[in-house]
Every structure is written in structure tokens, then in C-alpha cells.
């Protein structure tokens, strides 16, 4: 099975933001999310922020700032979460103080 199909099927089966999946610690959810995104980025460029926004997905505050920056689409396809302090907080603290909207790590830590 190719990795695209595997991750697509996995994403369809599991909603990490679902309250019913609350049994897993927020730190674990954060680490799983980071690992999945890292694997996706390793297989090729991610969807650019411009394309992501056009598809109706929300951007976190930092992604929104980058999407408006005068840089090429290739620069907008990098995994910004790798350098975001929210990822570090989320992976190491169980109740990370992350409050900005549309950040996946903030959603894992909402109670």
C-alpha cells in the first residue's frame, strides 16, 4: 500500500480532534500529528498555504501571516509547524498554553 493511500485511510478513520478520542493524552496526540506531517513532507511538498486556504481550510495565525508574505508558493509549502513554538510546547506539556485559533496543537490541548 502506498503512503498516500495509507494516510488517507487513516485520516478517514480517526479524527484526532474528536472529543470521543479524549482518552489519549494531548502530548501524545501532538506527537502523532507532528510525525504524520513530517512523513507527509518527506514524500514531497505539502499543499501550499494559498491552496490550503482556497480549499476552505483554516490557517493558524502564523500560516496566515506567511500566506500573505511576498514569497513563492514553494516557500509556502514548507511545514511551518516544525519551527513553531506551539509544537514544542504541545509535545512536552500536557496542558500547553496555546490559545490562538486554528492551531491543531491548540485544539489537542483544549479542555
Image (cartoon, grey):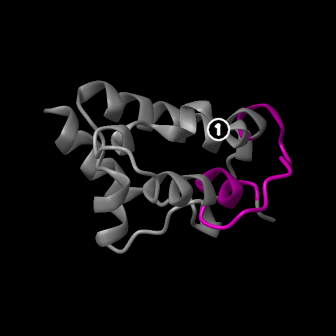
Residue closest to the eye, 105 or 56: 56
Residue 5 counted in the magenta span: no
Q: Is residue 1 left or right of residue 8?
A: left
Where residue 108 appears, x then y in whole percent? Answer: 68, 55
Q: Residue 95 lies in magenta, yes or no? A: yes
Residue at 60%, 52% in the rendered image: 62
Q: Quick check: can you spot residue 25?
A: no
* Quadrant the C terminus occupies: bottom right
Q: Position of residue 69 (x, y in %)?
A: 46, 52
Q: Residue at 41%, 69% (x, y): give it.
A: 57
In the displayed structure, would residue 58 be above or below residue 104?
A: below
Secondary element at tag 1:
loop
The residue lying toward the viewer, choosing from 3 and 105, is: 105
Instruction: Judge left or right: residue 8 versus residue 33.
Output: left
| Residue 78 position in % (x across, y down) | 39, 36
What main secondary structure does the magenta stretch of the protein show? loop
Q: Nearer the viewer, residue 71 or 80?
A: 71
How many badges with numbers are in the image?
1
Q: Nearer the viewer, residue 62 or 102?
A: 62
Q: Residue at position x 59%, y 65% from top?
A: 102
Q: Quadrant of residue 12?
A: bottom left
Give me the residue at 21% from left, 33% from top: 3
Viewed as shown, does residue 69 lie left or right of 107? left
What span is colored magenta in the figure?
A: 90-109
Image x and y of residue 22, in percent? 68, 58
Q: Is residue 99 among what the camera can see?
A: yes
Q: Which residue is mark 1?
A: 84
Residue 56 versus residue 68 in the image, above or below: below
Q: Quadrant of the N terminus?
A: top left
Amino acid at each position: 500500500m502506498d503512503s498516500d493511500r495509507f494516510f488517507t485511510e487513516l485520516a478517514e478513520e480517526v479524527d484526532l480532534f474528536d472529543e470521543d478520542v479524549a482518552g489519549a493524552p494531548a502530548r501524545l496526540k501532538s506527537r502523532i500529528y507532528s510525525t504524520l506531517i513530517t512523513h507527509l513532507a518527506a514524500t514531497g511538498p505539502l499543499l501550499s498555504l494559498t491552496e490550503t486556504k482556497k480549499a476552505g481550510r483554516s490557517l493558524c495565525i502564523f500560516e496566515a501571516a506567511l500566506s500573505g508574505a511576498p514569497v513563492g508558493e514553494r516557500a509556502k509549502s514548507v511545514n511551518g509547524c516544525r519551527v513553531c513554538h506551539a509544537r514544542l510546547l504541545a509535545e512536552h506539556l500536557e496542558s500547553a498554553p496555546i490559545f490562538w485559533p486554528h492551531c491543531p496543537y491548540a485544539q489537542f490541548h483544549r479542555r
